[in-house]
Amino acid sequence: MIVKTDQDLKGIMEAGKVAAEILHKMAKRIRPGITTGQLDKIGEEMMLRYGANSAPKVSYNFPGATCISILPEVAHGIPGSREIKAGDLVNIDVSIELNGYYGDNGMSIPVELEDERVLKLCQVGQEARAAAIAAAKPGGKINEIGKAVELVVKSHGYTVIKNLCGHGLGRKLHEAPENILNYYSKYERGKINPGQVLALEPFISEGPELVKDGGYDEWALVVPQGFYVVQFEHTIIVMEGGTIVTTVQPE
């Protein structure tokens, strides 16, 4: 989507703010013993209070209000009866529709997990997201985003998950540009328009470069056991006067 009116700007900003508040509240409620279904219910109830809808449900009939993945799941985990345990690495992805506009954000959360490996990976994941945001310029090349992510990640000895990527959004959850890669591709020739709304979400890995179908439902994507993978996502609006992050979490 290209933001062209004050209504568009207000709509995208409000959707991003609500998505961020829901993600923040869910992250604060994570503890050992809570099920992913209970956590999802917290998110769903907040959506209802704001008059928002679950974007995955609206767009793809996803069987949950949010995506909650526990490693080795990396993305699209279905909330249910599984209990979160100490030592888990949990990813929550919250995307919502509010008054016809969309907001999308996600984060990886170590649960009573003090392993230096995962703490560093989370730090690099956030650095990579910041680099992606900084690289998104009006009139700039889309592949500069992936280049910026890859430079950060490789400098720390990590890799990116190549078959998960960012995307445009606005009036739909997924719009053009549909595949914002987290690595440099000379074949990507697209440019970023002023006012473009993007969801940038680097997936950073200790080793594997691809996620695979988990083989037990239609949704979950996994990596082999023993490797950490994190994701950090923001929705942004690339404006001439500076980029706006719509999904800044409350303090």
Image (cartoon, helix red, strand yellow):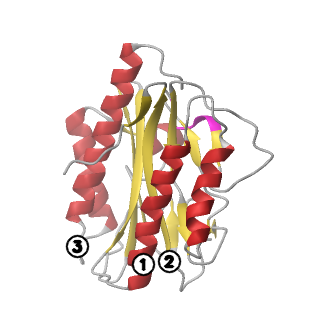
Q: Is residue 233 visible?
A: yes
In this picture, residue 16 sits left or right of residue 184 = left
How far apart are labels 3 and 1 at the CA level? 18 Å
- How many residues crowd around disc 3 within 10 Å: few (fewer than 14), some, or many (20 or more)? some
Residue at 61 percent of width and 32 percent of height: 192
Label 3, secondary structure: give it. Answer: loop
Judging depth in this view, the residue of 121 and 87 nearest the camera is 121
Residue at 40 percent of width and 48 percent of height: 105
Q: Which residue is mark 2?
A: 228
Mark 2 residue type: Tyr
Residue 73, given in percent of the width and then of the height, sits at: 51, 70
The quarter holding residue 29 reads bottom left
Q: Which residues are magenta?
A: 172-177
* Of the image marks 2 and 3, the number of the one nearer the N terminus: 3
Q: Is residue 191 magenta?
A: no
In which quadrant will I find the N terminus?
top right
Judging depth in this view, the residue of 6 and 64 nearest the camera is 6
Q: Which residue is mark 3?
A: 31
- How many residues crowd around disc 2 within 10 Å: few (fewer than 14), some, or many (20 or more)? many
The disc placed on residue 118 is 1
Residue 55, given in percent of the width and then of the height, sits at: 43, 40
How far apart are labels 2 and 3 at the CA level? 20 Å
